[in-house]
Image (cartoon, helix red, strand yellow):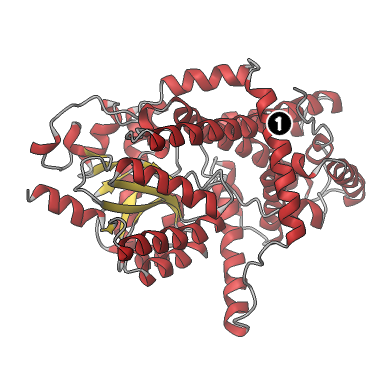
Amino acid sequence: MKLLIFSTLVLLVSCSTPAPKVSSELASSDMTPQRSLASVNKVEDLEQVASEMVFAPSEEKAMEAVSEQINGYQEAYLRTHDYLKKFDADLDHAVENGETFELAKNNNYQRILVLWDIRTRMRDKVIYAYFKAMKYSQSRDQGFASKVLSRFSKHISALTSAEKRTVGDLTSDLKKVQDFFDSKPSAQDIARVENGDVSWIFEKVEGRTAEVVNKIQKAFPSQGQELLPSKKELIQEEKDQQEIDQMAKQLSTATTELSQEIEAEAAALEIESTDRTPQAVAKYAPSVGRTGNLTGSEFPANTWAITFDDGPHASRTALVLEALKDYGVSGTFFQLGSAVKAKPTLVATVAKNNTVANHTFSHPQLTKLGAAEVKSQIKRTGDLIEKATGSRPKFMRCPYGSGISNSKVRQAIADEGMIHVFWNVDTLDWQDKNPSSIVQRAMKQMIANRKGIVLFHDIHPQSVKAIRLLLQKTNDITQSGKGTYKWKSLPSIVQEMNAR
């Protein structure tokens, strides 16, 4: 299948002049970052790609480098879309046949997790390259850059609506890089990004945006709310999804360098526990064995814990807290150290009625790091959480769940006095933008597994809406007597199991 070639992006990032504002069309897509863009690339890798795209010896060479990155990202998006369809089909089969649905053993799910990591790395490289171009262009002639950007805008305008959706978050993130520079970042801010912390760009921009939205909502309570899509927009979205389905289907049978990378990384993901200690005699506490890892399958019948990864978010975490409060539910928030450092007051607010847990500092795949780096990622975040809340976290979740059967990773977690927490219900809310289908996916897994740990992310608009829908649905089912869903805090569930 022919993938889109965004060759004109090179004209945007290879010029040495200040880039003008991204047009409203390029920035209009509400394709917010799939998750916090914490760097999972080494600085030298970021610099190499930036050099190839921004400072190439010729426009042709730069164009080739950009095309490679953008085409790779689009392929990753379409493959994720295809595997999600297959994952949902596997889930439907399990529910129809009354089978337990084990995420860790599902091949399509493993590939989705791998692609999450791959797409983030690809996107970080493009964003970092544009950051370098913007930095380099600050003292140059803006006229030429405007001319170049107009060509890029024209090229994007020529794409179909569906094609824009496959790279919508990239164009949105380019706008955030410009917003970052508009905020007049300090030398320390610039240095932090150049040291590989690409997420700092988004932390700064999200913080400023949240402040503006909060001020508008206080002054005009009816303003600043997300508008529901019109009928015309819903029809267009349905058409786009059909086109994306066809593009993904055509690509699914092709063997490419990326498809081979996906299979290799999925085989090395290490998300399935190899310890077979009987659950009935288990006392859960920090350890490298079965008793130091929770999946939810060991919970009492009908018992559920709701968890959130990758926050806190400057505005959406507060909305999640509000939803939990409305339904009398206490959640567990696995937070990134980079976000905790930027928003300690918000972290303290989360901790008042919920549990704050460790999710590493910058969301790397821990199995790819050395022992010292693993320890640093975990301990540094624990220190920041303790500083913000007054207590060290008792629970830890590996990014992508990768490392459950890895002794190096598990030992580092146990050494910090934490139990690792996996999940047996994944909403996949970072890929799916539809709150209704997110809830349907969650409910099917809950029906199949009957107890467990539900994974959300408190950084996406669709997640905020889906959380309320799910809590309302389980509440309605319980009150009607058609089923039982007991939402409990993670610490209380562990205490209950250990008291058996």
- Foreground residue among 205 and 449: 449
Residue corresponding to mark 1: 246
As helix, strand or loop, the secondary structure at mark 1 comes to helix
Q: Quadrant of residue 431?
A: top right
Q: Residue at x 62, y 80 (%)?
A: 222
Q: Quadrant of residue 48?
A: top right
| Quarter occupied by the N terminus | top right
361 relative position to 192: left or right: left
Q: Residue at x 58, y 33 (%)?
A: 80
**Residue 90: % across, % down:** 46, 31
148 relative position to 197: left or right: right
Whether 2 is drawn above or below 134: the answer is above
Q: Residue at x 42, y 19 (%)?
A: 267
**Residue 5: % across, % down:** 79, 30
Can residue 314 be seen from the camera position used here?
Answer: no
**Residue 164: % across, % down:** 75, 43
Q: Residue at x 45, y 58 (%)?
A: 312
141 relative position to 94: left or right: right
Can residue 464 be seen from the camera position used here?
Answer: yes
Whether 218 is drawn above or below 433: the answer is below
Q: Around disc 1, counting alpha carbons within 10 Å, would you say few (fewer than 14), some (14 to 19), or many (20 or more)?
A: some
Residue type indicated by callout 1: Gln
Q: Quadrant of residue 159?
A: top right
Residue lying furthest bottom: 219
- Foreground residue among 20 and 67: 67
